Amino acid sequence: MFEITFTDKDLLAEMVSSKKALSGAVYDFTYENRFLVYHAEIQSCLAYNVIDITTGYASRIINRKIGQEYKPNEFGRLIPLMFKSLKYIGNVKQDSGFKLKPYEAIEEIMRKVLPINGYDISESQIALCRCIFRCLTTTKLTFGATSIGRAAIVPYIVAGYVARKYRISEYYNEKAVIIVADKRLHTEFMKTVADISSVLYGIGIIDKPLKAVIRKRKESYICLRRYLRFDDKKILGGKVTVEMLCREPVDMEKLNLPGYAFKKLSVGNSCRECNERKRCWFRRFISTVNEDESITFQVMTHRFYVKTLSSAYSETNSVSPFGGFVIIDDRDKLYREAEIVFSDKLVEKDIRRSIYDAVCKTDSDKKLIRDAEETADRFFEAIEDIVRDSEDGYIIFDADAVRITDRLIRIFERLRYNEVKNPVAEFRNKKVREKLKKLKCRNRVEIRADKHNHSMSVYLSPKDLDAEMMRTLWSKDVSHMVIEHTEEERCE
């Protein structure tokens, strides 16, 4: 007879205080006086976890939506899942040399295993690998001040894997290691992960092959619902079919499509309410990537990482929305992307387009549009004058600029559009008005303007979000990685 008890609530509290269990943990039960099960809220899910009291190892059992927690009479259903999640641990693992001597594992892989298999490894790469591992096991985040290039790919992979393996008993290390790098390095990352995996798996250093996935924004993939409604299917050249979209996500960047087709076919914001959700493989792909704990690495661009960080932002969020280790190549680029993502961008041509799309039927309409054009000209002239006098690139509106902005807002409120011929014009008008209202609130925003392609762009950075996010992201005690040689590549 197996025994379930409910007597270890205080033990769980001690584990939380010593950071061996998730903060906010709720005790569920103890199985056979050895396996302690609890759940805690992580973002929008309840994460059920199990801790082996004898060995100290822990693992995730399952995630459930908030409000769907297990009831006491359902605890028996967790036991098979519990043993499945703990199948890789036990008393023997306590004596694992890999667990106790991670630096020796790094030395073994970087100095012996990889050179024997054709890699030209320098001392600077070994030092970088050790540095990354040290940072990951103390702060979960490390970044380089500038892009290191191909020479850093091997240290990133080795250090990320060893760190994840070394701290596999911690809840956050069930997630993949996030590698944020320039898009041009992604293919090289995937190739190197596959190659190193075959080497380490072949000689028995790892017990299963490494898995990696490239994360992209959803607009890069074809939407099944939009594909079914797309009229010009000939432009796809037969490369995309319904059956294909139902069994794999299709990346449009590989199809070389024109801009209009790209916009009409890409996955949109209504993906969660889509009628084709059950058939569309893109939704299954996203769920798998987020939940599959066998994935070792997720490779993504700086823009994708910061946008995900932005959408998941709250005062209680950790630095990584994915809950795992993060390695960032080129911190300066990440900062530039964050400045854009965490700001509202008001572009001059959006204002011009909203004016040109307005209905012009009567003399009063024509006069209103002329007033709008003149006011828009004065508006951007005022911004350019203020920017010219600014020393730090940031501007604060004076009384005249605020008055012009108010007048432009009032004119935009009176503009009318043909809802049948141009259904998005009214929505664009609303967005422009919202940004103009933010623009004049000089106590709430910092304004940075730049001129590009003969069109003025104004970035509005909310202080309460932007400043707090930057402080959270850059105040961590992380390393500024430096490598002497940037062109070391694998010997062919």
Image: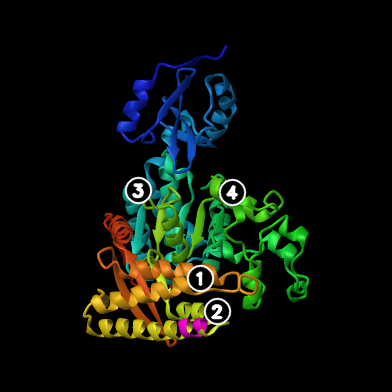
Report, in whole angstroms, how far the alpha carbon at label 3 lies from the one at label 4: 27 Å
Q: Tell me if residue 61 is in the magenta stretch.
A: no
Q: Amino acid at mark 3?
A: Thr
Residue highlighted by disc 2: 357
Observer-side mark, 2 or 3, equals 2
Q: Amino acid at mark 1?
A: Arg
Observer-side mark, 2 or 4, equals 2
> Which region of the structure is painted magenta?
364-368
Residue highlighted by disc 3: 137
Q: Quadrant of residue 336?
A: bottom left
Q: Is residue 133 above or below residue 409?
A: above
Observer-side mark, 3 or 4, equals 4
Tell whether label 2 touches label 1 (CB within 8 Å).
Answer: yes
Q: Amino acid at mark 4?
A: Ser
Q: Earlier in the sequence, mark 1 or mark 4?
A: 4
Report, in whole angstroms, how far the alpha carbon at label 2 lies from the one at label 4: 40 Å
Observer-side mark, 1 or 3, equals 1
